[in-house]
């Protein structure tokens, strides 16, 4: 057995992972104690990485129009289609849509091929949906896409303002570092700004529950307050900035009463926040998708940066405006120019930069101007302007807004290539050609995390089937197009060296991104490369950017941006009353293509649900667990209702993860208009107007199967992976006859079972059917008009893996007295359920330590700690009442 260091592929924290590998198998993973991002910690997603290395759903061979084909045939076909479309319709008819899941080397070659040799800059990425507003704002303010903070700043600052970030769920290890730092420094203050009361509020001294999308008012008001209170750092402003007067004029209307009116906050709450910010020199403002995913995201980011510039709070330890990325390699994509409006190595489409890159690449057909950003790219495809699209490692049919338009775009393209490690995504269904890509643990390259730290993602095991690296596919296609010399790459180290070299060409400190000090790295040094922060200039002694007050603008000064805050609204014509907010869940990632296959990760939140606050739910006559339809003129989803205690009236929250692989009608992006920020092109994914209504259910059902069930249209279904199979929740909104339902639901399964044991009670419409073969359970189906009369999910989920299977008669009963129902999993690491915790609390356990001692919950990755604390607080409040 050997240990190998690599990097977690999920989020922008970029945790180091040490994998134990034996006989071509990853046995276990643990946090890499030497990695600066996590120092040994991992969240629950990272902890379960080894469980994602399974064959299920993997794309194992190239598939052309439904049939397996050879790699050579597939690559010839891609080259031929690109040539044909380019010849007939011009370079602008070709597009690549990439992903923050790609490695930097993959990104580099795709960008080089498109922008240097195909003559178009139509290469964009799903990182457009995640942080392009932050990029645009840094560029407007600093003249470069430079993140001026590190994770250590989050620990060392005295005030941390977390805005639009539920880090406890989305960046858990960073959140744990912050929580630990707060314990050490009791004077550290944390402010959370979020329309929802999330788990991140657990460590907040102050939670500002602002109206959705009103953040720019809050920060424009802060600038106004700092001015009126004489709290500007005039020396810093005079020496290092420009444009303050215009910014002050633009925000002059944002006095306290106007900000209170727009944000819905009390003047006292505003005063408390503004005073705290004004009085604390060492302040970091940490922001994420809640700020970026907006039609005015760039302005919101600049409203934050303005306050840091006005107080001179950046470029020194423990201070600065810090955007964290959602994806593991969003930063790497930015470095190589993975966005359609960037070139490479943080260069833009200026004539000088275009010439420089053209010469360096020896490019034969260099793009001279920016290409189409993600949403515009798919619009162009829907309108027939883009004819060929290659989608790598992402699922835009689910993740982009207005998914009906996106699906139309994919249908309209003459040829769609999807390269991915899985073949059963909603997007893959539109592909003419599927190319099997290596997944985590199989591929080899680098990623850059949110604090500019480049880490190696290393190959641990042999690739599944015929999967290949993305960079290899692009290189092979480029060679077939006649660009052999420019794409003569045999190893990712060669690509990395070229990328590093380009970053240093004619740089001399004029561009922030410089890793030319790594350009001569040997293959061995690349293999061994430790986590490395950029810049790494070839000549030593160059100061880290911005620390000396020098910026990358023409004048060398940072720009204040004049902005006039506005509240969000949906496209005209969408008049529904509820404001939809979207976000991520603790144990899930993206469209669940990886996390959705790990049974343990499906037990914190199992079936697709949306949240309303208690007031809104009551006003709508809805209760916890009801089936609801959420709809507007763009589309509709069906979901279970979760009543979230602190969600304000007028708002509804939905997770982003569900696709048609996991639930019947669950693509929430289908309700979000394709409204984008005019500067960054980032879609407003966190705001839509919708209506909600209850859906009558005539019959609920639970179906347990070993294979993926084929489900007829009933009204609602949502399924989870369980050990050895699947558990599907069904709700029929049409009249259902049990025997007809049985025939429809079990048709393909009935023949696999030798013995069928049924129970039917026509009075109560209760129906149960167990199928077994040689004593092995093949399927189980339970139908009842009342959901609470169905068996516990927890018990059902363990049946296929249970060593001690009850007789069919016992299974018909729907419970086993010797297997207590744990309820929803709270602690995924130790599989501790809500009921067990409740029982421990009732039995007198009243501290986190005692809970940990008794049940072990909260003692490993720490992701469940905020929820455990909430349960303890609720108990305290009950006792006090
Ligand atoms: Fe992976 Fe969790 Fe670390 Fe993010 S915080 S990189 S998901 S282990």
Image (spheres, helix red, strand yellow):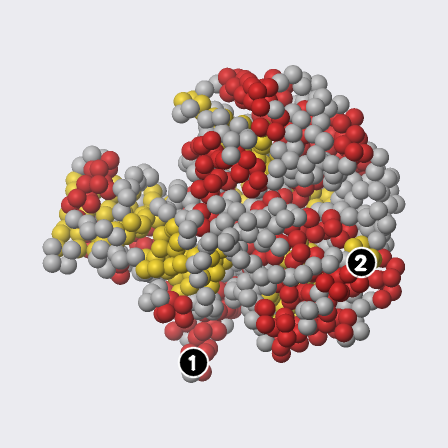
Does residue 184 appear in this view?
Answer: no
Does residue 573 appear in this view?
Answer: yes
Q: Percent x, y for residue 465?
A: 47, 27
Is 549 placed above or below 376 here?
A: below
Disc on the earlier residue, 1 or 2: 2
Q: Percent x, y for residue 843?
A: 39, 73
Q: Percent x, y for residue 661?
A: 39, 42
Q: CA distance from mark 1 to mark 2?
A: 56 Å
Q: Residue at x 50, y 17 (%)?
A: 73
Does 338 sit left or right of 360 as displayed? left
Q: Which residue is mark 1?
A: 879
Cβ at disc 1 under 8 Å from ligand 1: no
Q: Residue at x 32, y 48 (%)?
A: 717
Is 749 placed above or below 388 here?
A: below
Q: Which residue is mark 2?
A: 243
Quadrant, the C terminus: bottom left
């Amino acid at each position: 057995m050997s240990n190998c260091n690599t990097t977690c592929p999920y989020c922008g924290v970029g945790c180091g992972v040490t994998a134990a590998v034996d006989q071509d198998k990853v046995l276990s993973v643990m946090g890499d104690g030497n990695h600066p991002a996590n120092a040994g910690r991992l969240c629950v997603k990272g902890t379960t990485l080894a469980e994602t290395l399974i064959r299920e759903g993997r794309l194992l061979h190239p598939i052309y129009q439904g049939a397996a084909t050879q790699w050579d045939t597939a690559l010839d076909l891609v080259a031929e289609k690109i040539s044909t479309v380019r010849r007939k319709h011009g370079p602008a008819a070709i597009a690549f849509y990439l992903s923050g899941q790609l490695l930097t080397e993959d990104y580099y070659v795709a960008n080089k091929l498109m922008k240097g040799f195909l003559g178009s800059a139509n290469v964009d990425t799903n990182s457009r949906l995640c942080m392009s507003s932050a990029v645009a704002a840094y560029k407007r303010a600093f003249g470069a896409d430079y993140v001026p903070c590190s994770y250590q700043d989050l620990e060392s600052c005295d005030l941390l303002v977390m805005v639009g970030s539920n880090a406890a769920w989305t960046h858990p290890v960073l959140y744990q570092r912050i929580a630990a730092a707060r314990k050490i420094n009791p004077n550290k203050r944390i402010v959370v700004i979020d329309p929802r009361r999330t788990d991140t509020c657990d460590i907040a001294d102050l939670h500002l529950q602002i109206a959705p999308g009103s953040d720019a008012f809050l920060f424009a008001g802060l600038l106004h307050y700092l001015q009126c209170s004489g709290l500007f750092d005039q020396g810093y402003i005079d020496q290092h900035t420009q444009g303050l007067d215009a910014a002050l004029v633009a925000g002059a209307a944002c006095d306290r009463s106007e900000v209170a009116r727009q944000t819905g906050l009390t003047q006292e709450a505003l005063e408390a926040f503004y005073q705290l910010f004004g009085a604390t020199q060492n302040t970091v403002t940490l922001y994420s998708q809640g700020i970026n995913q907006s039609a005015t995201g760039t302005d919101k980011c600049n409203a934050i940066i303005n306050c840091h510039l006005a107080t001179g709070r950046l470029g020194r330890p423990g201070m600065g405006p810090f955007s964290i990325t959602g994806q593991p390699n969003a930063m790497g994509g930015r470095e190589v120019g993975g966005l359609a409006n960037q070139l490479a190595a943080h260069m833009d489409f200026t004539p000088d930069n275009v010439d420089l890159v053209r010469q360096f690449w020896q490019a034969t057909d260099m793009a001279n101007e920016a290409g189409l950003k993600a949403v515009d790219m798919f619009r162009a495809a829907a309108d027939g302007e883009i004819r060929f699209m290659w989608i790598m490692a992402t699922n835009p049919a689910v993740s982009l807004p207005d998914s009906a338009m996106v699906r139309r775009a994919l249908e309209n393209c003459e040829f769609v290539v999807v390269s991915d490690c899985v073949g059963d995504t909603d997007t893959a269904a539109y592909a003419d050609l599927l190319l099997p890509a290596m997944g985590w643990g199989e591929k080899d390259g680098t990623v850059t995390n949110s604090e500019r730290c480049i880490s190696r993602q290393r190959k641990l095991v042999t690739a599944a089937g015929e999967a290949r690296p993305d960079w290899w596919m692009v290189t092979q296609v480029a060679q077939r197009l006649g660009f052999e010399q420019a794409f003569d790459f045999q190893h990712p180290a060669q690509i990395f060296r070229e990328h590093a070299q380009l970053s240093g060409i004619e740089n001399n400190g004029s561009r922030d991104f410089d890793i030319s000090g790594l350009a001569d790295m040997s293959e061995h040094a690349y293999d061994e490369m430790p986590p490395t922060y950029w810049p790494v200039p070839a000549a030593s002694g160059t100061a880290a950017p911005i620390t000396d007050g020098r910026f990358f603008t023409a004048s060398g000064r940072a720009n204040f941006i004049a902005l006039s805050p506005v509240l969000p609204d949906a496209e005209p014509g969408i008049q529904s009353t509820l404001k939809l907010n979207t976000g991520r869940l603790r144990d899930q990632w993206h469209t669940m293509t990886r996390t959705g296959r790990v049974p343990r990760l499906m037990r914190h939140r199992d079936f697709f649900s949306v949240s309303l606050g208690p007031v809104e739910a009551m006003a709508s006559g809805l209760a916890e667990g009801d089936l609801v339809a959420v709809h507007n003129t763009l589309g509709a989803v069906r979901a279970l209702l979760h009543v979230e205690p602190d969600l304000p009236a007028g708002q509804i929250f939905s997770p982003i993860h569900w696709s048609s692989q996991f639930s019947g009608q669950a693509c929430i992006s289908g309700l979000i208009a394709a409204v984008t920020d005019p500067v960054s092109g980032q879609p407003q994914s966190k705001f839509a107007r919708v209506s909600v209504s209850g859906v009558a259910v005539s019959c609920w059902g639970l179906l347990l199967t070993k294979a993926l069930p084929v489900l007829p249209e009933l009204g609602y279904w949502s399924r989870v992976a369980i050990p050895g199979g699947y558990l599907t929740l069904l709700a029929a909104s049409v009249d259902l006859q049990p025997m007809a339902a049985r025939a429809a639901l079990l048709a393909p399964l009935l023949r696999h079972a030798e013995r069928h044991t049924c129970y039917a009670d026509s009075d109560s419409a209760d129906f149960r059917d167990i199928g077994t073969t040689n004593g092995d359970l093949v399927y189980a189906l339970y139908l009842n008009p009342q959901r609470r009369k169905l068996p516990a999910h927890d018990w059902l989920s363990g049946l296929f893996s249970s060593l001690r299977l009850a007789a069919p008669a016992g299974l018909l009963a729907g419970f086993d007295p010797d297997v207590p129902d744990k309820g929803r999993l709270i602690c995924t690491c130790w599989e501790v359920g809500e009921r067990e915790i409740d029982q421990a609390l009732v039995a007198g356990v009243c501290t986190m330590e005692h809970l940990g001692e008794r049940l072990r919950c909260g003692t490993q990755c720490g992701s469940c700690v905020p929820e455990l604390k909430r349960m303890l607080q609720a108990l305290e409040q009950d006792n006090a009442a």
